[in-house]
Image (cartoon, rainbow, N blue to C red):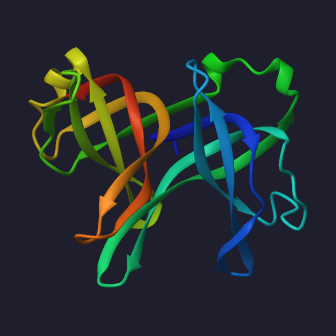
Amino acid sequence: MENNTVTLIGEIVSGFTYNHEVYGEGFYLVDLAVKRLSDQMDVIPVLVSDRLFDVSRNYSGHTVQVVGQYRSFNIIKGNKKGLFLSVFAREIFFLRSDLVDATKSNSIYLKGYLCKIPDLRATPLGREITDMLIAVNRPYGKSDYIPCIVWGRNARYAAGFEVGSTVEITGRIQSREYKKRLDDERVETRVAYEVSVSKINLILG
């Protein structure tokens, strides 16, 4: 699908966890640590077929390149629904870690439709950002819903988009921890996944 392409290069930092099966083909989740230019790490879930990779082995510490798509799945926790995001692997290649170029280790291209009103806000340090939710079509009538964050001048530009607008996005996938207050006494640490947008275009017509 040319409207949804991802390339990641990073280190496998977990074993494989069974997720689901389709027509006898098993799918497993594995975590990939991808380095930013700042040397911070994004830990990104990757969904792998047991026909593509030997999921019975533990490849922790190995450096790989993953080529695929960013996909979303609805999950239910208690009475609440949410989105689970992972990279669906179409190809995986082993690499030498000393040959990895951090500037090319995390890239995503999406072409889809704006499905919520953009939310322009400011960070505690005063930097403007716009939150967007993009629907990217798959075959057979399915869609993936991808949260995106747009920064600075692009944030002000994207804040004016209307629901239903077609947009093209390039950027990187990032993970971030945040605190969710459950009640007066309990606070839970959670992880959010989103696309940090470097370029965005509004497609007219």
Give above or below for 190 relative to 163. below
Q: Is residue 102 shown to the viewer in this render?
A: yes
Depth check, front residue: 109 or 75: 75
Question: Does 26 appear above or below 16?
Answer: below
Percent x, y of residue 145: 35, 55
Q: Position of residue 35 (x, y in %)?
A: 64, 29
Residue lying at the far front in this picture: please name it. 185
Where residue 125 sits, quadrant-wise, is top left
Q: Nearer the viewer, residue 27 or 121?
A: 121
How many circles with numbers are drawn on the protein?
0
Q: State the residue in front, 1 or 87.
A: 87
> Is 51 drawn above or below residue 43 in the view shown?
below
Of the 4 image quadrants, the one containing the C terminus is top left
Percent x, y of residue 48: 71, 59
Q: Residue at x 31, y 24 (%)?
A: 200
**Would residue 130 appear left or right of 54 to someone viewing this image?**
left
- Rendering quarter of residue 167: top left
Q: Does residue 142 appear in the picture of this structure?
A: no
Q: Is residue 71 above or below residue 142?
A: above
Question: Is residue 12 or residue 116 the one in the foreground?
Answer: 12
Residue displayed at 24% across by 42% down: 132
Residue at 14% x, 22% y: name it.
156
**Image location of residue 172, percent across then percent down:** 49, 31
- Left or right, 13 with respect to 187, comes to right
